Image: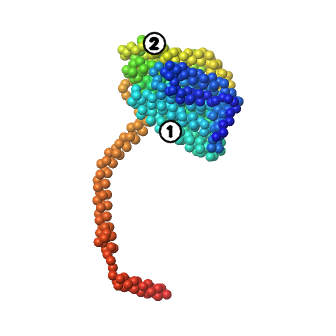
């Protein structure tokens, strides 16, 4: 193994991974400080790296580029570090050491993906992410028995995605001889499998349901970590490898409306927000499929803003779960009276995801819709605008209304501990600061951008859209109220149908096999008895024959063969 370094600098993700491995060894007093220090050091390293820095490892005739700078990688790595640090602040008072340790390994491997310069390095970090995220879910299994099963299903889905990705990478290397991360087209077996492997992690159909299945079963803080990395790392990989791939437009539009419909049907507040992740990633995939510089800037900016406001929404929901022990909308309501800080932060997150002016969602998501309009994709533009109203319905109004307002549930829990309130306040501040000063995010986007979000036309159009959606919500409020129902999704096939079929097969096997076994034994015994009768010690073939009779038969056979020979002549 040969290591080549351009300078004494290490990949930023290694700091978080090492920090996660060291956390269990630290004392209780040092863990909170370390949990905040490691993401900060990683963020500093992200911004110290320049295009001149590199780290390569020669392994099995391949060069693994573990440190490769790109503008896209830096923006994603930056928000990953912010999510890890603020998530750790939110988590350290109640999260287990296993969860925090796994979360840092998870976050560090996500940062590692953003600085990978080749497909093999990306795959290595990709698989470490799968292990770390599975442990984040599994760490909550003591408090929530459902977490164990959810973590195993989650792992199986991501192992499947990893296998598909590895086969694709192998086929691509065999066809091109290159491991470089470059823009590709899905025009060969290898590139198609790489695309599918990325889409599995993005939550694309038909396996979109793994997000809503697994994320809500993690702890209040675990869900925050999970929302930040897996799907957005997939967005980064698609942005780098498949910009302008038209199929992503259609996949993204499916995800946009799938997420809206299932979020509107859902009763569990964290499943509402999990389905919303699918919806928001769909916007990003559409932008990547459009493939123009404005669209790719929009996908990167939207991913950055989404990690922050979705983390804020899940912090708000997690605080409610921690303080009440309840997660269904039918059990909640009126919590603004005793949890004002949590309610205000939840509302700010809801406004941001709905792209209300002066929030981060307004200045980032509009890049994507503008890119669709500029590209002449009028139908795509119309669908994205219509979907924006759907986002306001399920995440902008439904979540805060049913959790903090509507009926009075009689619950009077206080706001969560100070560290959780501080983490939510920081996230809210970021949502507002980015919305008020969009140059903060526009300045770090991968392509030069000349875009003004606060035009009169744009602001008025967006406010009209939001007002109409809000009016529709309250007019249809009786239909929006949820009952104690279960939403069936694709995971019904592998959670219910297949196990049910296997159970029936097992029952049928138990009923059929005993008589079949008896018949086989009886048949075998009869055949064995017959063989024993013929070939056994007293059988016909075991008898002794006199020499004279044998000589006679030999003479007969010899005579017969001579007659046949002469007849032939």
- Residue 463, compared with residue 278, is above or below; it is above
> Label 2 neighbourhood size at 10 Å, few (<14), some (14-19), many (20+)?
some
Give above or below for 106 relative to 502.
Answer: above
Residue depicted at 52% across the width and 20% down the height: 30
Q: Which residue is mark 2?
A: 340
Q: Is residue 241 above or below residue 319?
A: below
Q: Is residue 484 left or right of residue 26?
A: left
Marker disc for residue 319:
none
Q: Is residue 522 visible?
A: yes
Return the x and y of residue 542 as percentages of the image width and height. Answer: 33, 73
Q: Position of residue 475 (x, y in %)?
A: 43, 19
Judged by depth in the image, the label closer to the viewer, 1 or 2, is 1
Q: Mark 1 — residue? A: 159
From the viewer's side, name the closer residue of 565 and 361.
565
Q: CA distance from mark 1 to mark 2?
A: 42 Å
Mark 1 nearby-residue class (10 Å; few <14, some 14–19, many ≥20): some
Q: Earlier in the sequence, mark 1 or mark 2?
A: 1
Nearer the observer, 178 or 313: 178
57 or 285, nearer to the observer: 57
Q: Residue at x 33, y 48 (%)?
A: 509
| Label 2 SS | helix
SS at mark 1 in the image: helix
Q: Position of residue 135 (x, y in %)?
A: 48, 31
């Amino acid at each position: 193994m040969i290591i080549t370094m351009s300078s004494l600098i290490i990949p930023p993700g290694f700091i978080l991974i090492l920090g996660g491995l060291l956390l269990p060894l630290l004392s209780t007093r040092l863990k909170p400080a370390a949990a905040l220090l490691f993401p900060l050091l990683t963020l500093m390293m992200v911004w110290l790296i320049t295009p001149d820095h590199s780290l390569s490892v020669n392994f099995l005739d391949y060069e693994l580029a573990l440190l490769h700078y790109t503008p896209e990688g830096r923006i994603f790595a930056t928000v990953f570090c912010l999510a890890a640090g603020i998530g750790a602040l939110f988590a350290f008072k109640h999260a287990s050491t296993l969860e925090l340790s796994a979360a840092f390994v998870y976050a560090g491997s996500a940062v590692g993906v953003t600085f990978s310069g080749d497909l093999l390095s990306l795959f290595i970090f990709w698989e470490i992410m799968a292990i770390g995220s599975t442990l984040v879910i599994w760490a909550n299994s003591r408090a929530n028995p459902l977490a164990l099963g959810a973590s195993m299903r989650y792992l199986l889905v991501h192992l499947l995605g990893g296998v598909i990705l590895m086969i694709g990478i192998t086929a691509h290397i065999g066809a091109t001889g290159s491991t470089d991360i470059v823009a590709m087209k899905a025009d060969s077996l290898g590139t198609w499998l790489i695309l599918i492997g990325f889409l599995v992690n993005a939550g694309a159909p038909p396996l979109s349901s793994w997000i809503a299945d697994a994320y809500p079963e993690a702890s209040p803080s675990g869900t925050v970590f999970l929302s930040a990395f897996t799907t957005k790392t997939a967005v980064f990989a698609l942005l780098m490898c498949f910009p302008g791939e038209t199929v992503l437009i259609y996949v993204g539009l499916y995800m946009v409306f799938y997420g809206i419909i299932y979020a509107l049907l859902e009763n569990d507040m964290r499943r509402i927000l999990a389905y919303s992740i699918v919806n928001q990633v769909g916007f990003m995939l559409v932008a990547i499929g459009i493939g123009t510089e404005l669209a790719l800037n929009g996908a990167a900016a939207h991913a950055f803003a989404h990690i922050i406001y979705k983390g804020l929404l899940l912090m708000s929901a997690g605080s409610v779960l921690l303080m009440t022990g309840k997660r269904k909308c039918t059990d909640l309501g009126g919590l603004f009276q005793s949890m004002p800080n949590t309610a205000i932060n939840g509302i700010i997150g809801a406004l941001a995801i709905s792209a209300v002016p002066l929030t981060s969602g307004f200045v980032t998501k509009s890049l994507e819709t503008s890119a669709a309009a500029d590209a002449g994709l009028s139908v795509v533009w119309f669908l994205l605008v219509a979907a924006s109203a759907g986002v306001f319905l399920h995440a902008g109004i439904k979540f805060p209304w049913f959790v903090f307002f509507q009926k009075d549930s009689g619950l009077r829990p206080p706001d969560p501990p100070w560290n959780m309130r501080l983490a939510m306040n920081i996230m809210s501040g970021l949502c507002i600061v980015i919305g008020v000063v969009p140059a903060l995010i526009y300045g770090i986007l991968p392509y030069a951008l000349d875009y003004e979000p606060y035009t009169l036309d744009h602001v008025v159009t967006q406010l009209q859209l939001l007002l109409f959606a809000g009016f529709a919500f309250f007019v249809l409020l009786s239909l929006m109220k949820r009952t104690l129902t279960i939403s069936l999704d694709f995971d019904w096939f592998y959670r219910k149908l297949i196990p049910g079929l296997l159970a029936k097969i097992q029952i049928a096997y138990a009923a059929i096999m005993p008589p079949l076994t008896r018949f086989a034994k009886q048949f075998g015994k009869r055949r064995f008895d017959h063989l024993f009768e013929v070939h056994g010690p007293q059988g016909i073939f075991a008898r002794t024959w006199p020499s004279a009779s044998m000589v006679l038969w030999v003479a007969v056979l010899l005579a017969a063969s001579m007659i046949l020979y002469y007849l032939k002549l």
